[in-house]
Amino acid sequence: MIVGERKPLQEILKAVEKYEKVLVLGCGECVTVCMAGGDKEARETALAISLARKKAGKAVEVESHTVERQCEFEFLESTRKGVEAADVIVSLACGVGVQTMNMHYQDKLTLPGINTTFMGLPVQQGVWMENCLGCGNCVLEETMGICPIARCSKSMLNGPCGGSQYGKCEISKDVDCGWNLIYERLEKFGKLDALAEIKPPKDWSTTHSGGPRKMVREDVKL
């Protein structure tokens, strides 16, 4: 899932200070699960904007609405009336949702209310762990299901660096060394010999380093 957190209220207030009619738009997908941009958060944010502006003596009309998915045009039509009535939209979706809104409603400005952080795993209530960077060339079959790109702080492909000690990464004693985890999995499945295979430098052109990416599925394309 895509993980993010709401921007500080003061940052949102500064972004909308010139507008009198604000629509706060939540999303029913990832940001709802990570409790950052669902219907509850959209209503809370709208109320916070309204109270702060009133306290400052500035007129404002703030509405909130939530769509099932902000990343698909078809779901955005349900909020057309609210968008057209607003001067500006504050999206609590991920960065993809914000951009989709700006593409679909080109005559309205949609601003981000979320700092999109990473794709991650919910490990417990209120805690998420990054475990995928979307590099476009998955090697999880070679590393026993643990991503060396996301889980190793240096994205190394041929084992741990010299800073790894006692199974922890040099950046923090609270961060597991990704390659120590991979080693343990390789040992469990009797595949430690795989560590002797030298992996070539990664082709980063499949990641964002190669420019904006696009995927086409001819088998489902209309």
Image (cartoon, rainbow, N blue to C red):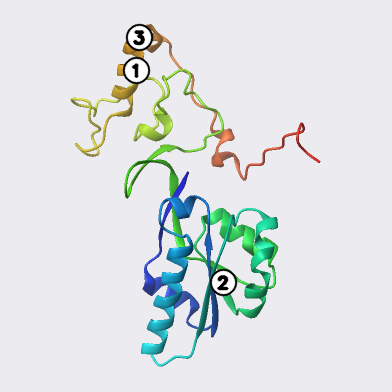
Crowding near the residue tagged with mark 1, few <14, some 14–19, many ≥20 C-alpha atoms within 10 Å: some
Amino acid type, callout 3: Leu
Q: Secondary structure at mark 2?
A: strand
The reply, left or right, for residue 190 in relation to residue 71 is left
Q: Secondary structure at mark 3?
A: helix
Closer to the observer: label 2 or label 3? 2
Q: CA distance from mark 1 to mark 2?
A: 47 Å
- Classify residue 43 by image quadrant: bottom left
Name the residue that disc number 3 marks: 192
140 in relation to 53, above or below = above
The reply, left or right, for residue 82 in relation to residue 204 is right
Amino acid type, callout 2: Ile
152 in relation to 189, above or below = below
Amino acid type, callout 1: Arg
Crowding near the residue tagged with mark 3, few <14, some 14–19, many ≥20 C-alpha atoms within 10 Å: some
Labels 1 & 3 near each other (Cβ < 8 A): no
* N-term-proximal mark, 1 vs 2: 2
Name the residue that disc number 2 marks: 89
Q: Residue drawn 28% across and 23% down? A: 180
